[in-house]
Image (tube, rainbow, N blue to C red):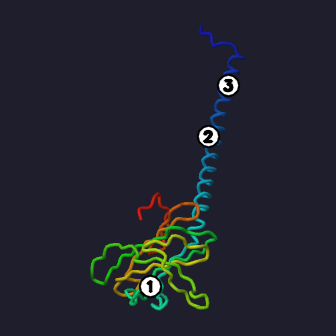
């Protein structure tokens, strides 16, 4: 006859087995809670990162050529792309590319702006904004609540429907962003322009 041992040994083994199952269940529950907390933290971080960038807007705007403090070669410019910084902090290194697509023709190559500038009343007594040139294709800083603009010398037609644009800027935390024609905002891993 086979000796199966004594009852206390079997009871101890059973209790140890149940404790092992309970520990595995507790570990699994804790792991799931930790995973959910990490996901919530990542979501909160993403929302916080996007906070300033979400407050930057881009519009295509018609302008009075007399509001450009530039040479005669810009006398026929009648529109510009404007970045509106509605955040409480400055944005830096704002740059823009456009691509013109004339009706029935292939899209032209993407081009950086010929001039970038600040938009503000100048002289201060003027009620309308004046384009004040600050860089060839980049606006170094657009202050909180301020606007920056981009113009191109040879843009045929001024209808924004025939253009696609990409605006890139660096927020106050040093993160790089891009806004496109559809106002899609995307965080960039790095900038090449």
Mark 2 vs mark 1, foreground winner is 1
Left or right, 49 with respect to 22, comes to left
The residue sitting at the right extreme is 8
The foreground one among 180 and 192 is 192
* Crowd around label 2: few <14 · some 14–19 · many ≥20 (10 Å): few
* Crowd around label 1: few <14 · some 14–19 · many ≥20 (10 Å): some
The residue sitting at the left extreme is 105
In which quadrant of the rendered image does the N terminus lie? top right
Q: Which of disc 3 and disc 2 is earlier in sequence?
A: 3
The foreground one among 154 and 74 is 74
Calculate the distance from the C-alpha at mark 1 to the C-alpha at mark 3: 85 Å
Q: Which of disc 3 and disc 1 is earlier in sequence?
A: 3
Indicate the quadrant where residue 29 lies: top right
* Crowd around label 3: few <14 · some 14–19 · many ≥20 (10 Å): few
Q: Disc 2 designates what residue?
A: 28
Q: Disc 3 designates what residue?
A: 16
Tag of residue 70: 1
Q: Is residue 37 above or below residue 18?
A: below
The residue that appears at 59% across and 10% down in the rendered structure is 2
Under circle 3, the secondary element is helix
The residue that appears at 57% across and 88% down in the rendered structure is 123
Indicate the quadrant where residue 84 lies: bottom right
């Amino acid at each position: 006859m086979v000796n199966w041992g004594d009852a206390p040994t079997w009871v101890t083994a059973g209790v140890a087995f149940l404790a092992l199952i309970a520990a595995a269940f507790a570990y699994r529950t804790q792991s799931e809670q930790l995973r959910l907390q990490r996901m919530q933290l990542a979501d909160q971080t993403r929302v916080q990162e996007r906070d300033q960038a979400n407050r930057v807007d881009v519009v295509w705007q018609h302008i009075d050529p007399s509001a450009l403090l530039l040479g005669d070669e810009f006398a026929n410019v009648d529109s510009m792309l404007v970045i509106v910084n509605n955040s409480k902090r400055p944005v830096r290194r704002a740059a823009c590319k456009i691509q013109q697509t004339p009706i029935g023709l292939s899209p032209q190559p993407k081009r950086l702006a010929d001039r970038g500038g600040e938009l503000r009343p100048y002289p201060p007594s003027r009620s309308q904004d004046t384009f004040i040139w600050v860089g060839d294709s980049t606006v170094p800083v657009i202050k909180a609540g301020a606007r920056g603009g981009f113009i191109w010398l040879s843009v045929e037609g001024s209808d924004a429907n025939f253009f696609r644009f990409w605006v890139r800027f660096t927020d106050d935390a040093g993160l790089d962003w891009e806004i496109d024609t559809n106002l899609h905002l995307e965080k960039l891993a790095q900038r090449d322009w």
